Amino acid sequence: MERKYPPIAQICVLVLVSMVIGGVLLAANAVLLSRIPDFAWASFFKVFRWTILAEGIVAGVLEFVFIFDGTRGAVLVLMSSTLVIFVLDLAVLFGFSVAQFQEESGIST
């Protein structure tokens, strides 16, 4: 008699695919963002850097928890990569959300 298992392997593959898609979409966002004429880059990078700092601290604490909990190998790489994508995605989102309403000369760095 064959045992029935939940779809663990399929879900793991879906998580990996989702992470890769997230990275590709983040890169596409960077390309689209770079093509905006007369964009308030000073405002964008000011918010971007502070978001990287704040969310980087959160991601660092989570990374510590993963390592302290004994997470190793491919799972640690997957979780770390996901944290990097999360931090960069929030930084781009927050930076763009502020800069889109600023004049090009906006906030100085």
Image (spheres, helix red, strand yellow):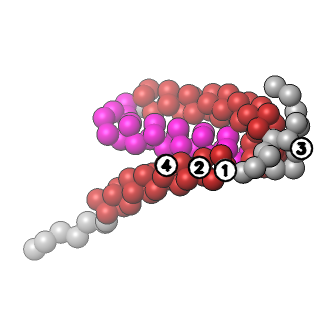
Whichever of callouts 1 and 4 sits on the residue coming sooner in the sequence is: 4
Residue ID at (52%, 40%): 83
How far, Cα to Cα, is label 2 from label 1?
7 Å
Q: Quadrant of the N terminus?
A: bottom left
In this rendering, the count of numbered labels is 4
Whichever of callouts 3 and 1 sits on the residue coming sooner in the sequence is: 1
Horizontally, is 3 left or right of 43 in the view? left
Task: Label the magenta part by its dominant secondary structure.
Answer: helix
Q: Which residue is mark 4?
A: 23
Which of the two marks, 3 or 1, is nearer to us in this view? Answer: 1
Q: Which residue is mark 3?
A: 103
Horizontally, is 100 left or right of 66 in the view? right
How far, Cα to Cα, is label 1 from label 4?
19 Å
Residue at the farthest left position: 1
Q: Which residue is mark 2?
A: 31
Q: Amino acid at mark 1?
A: Arg
Does residue 8 appear anywhere in the picture? Answer: no
How far, Cα to Cα, is label 2 from label 3?
21 Å
Within 10 Å of the Cα at label 1, are there few (<14), some (14-19), or many (20+) other Cα atoms?
few
Residue ID at (49%, 44%): 82
Which of the two marks, 1 or 4, is nearer to us in this view? Answer: 1
Point out the stretch of residues depicted in magenta. 70-94
Q: Amino acid at mark 2?
A: Val
Q: Which residue is mark 1?
A: 35
Q: Amino acid at mark 3?
A: Glu
Which element carries disc 4, helix, strand or loop? helix
Q: Position of residue 49 (x, y in %)?
A: 70, 30
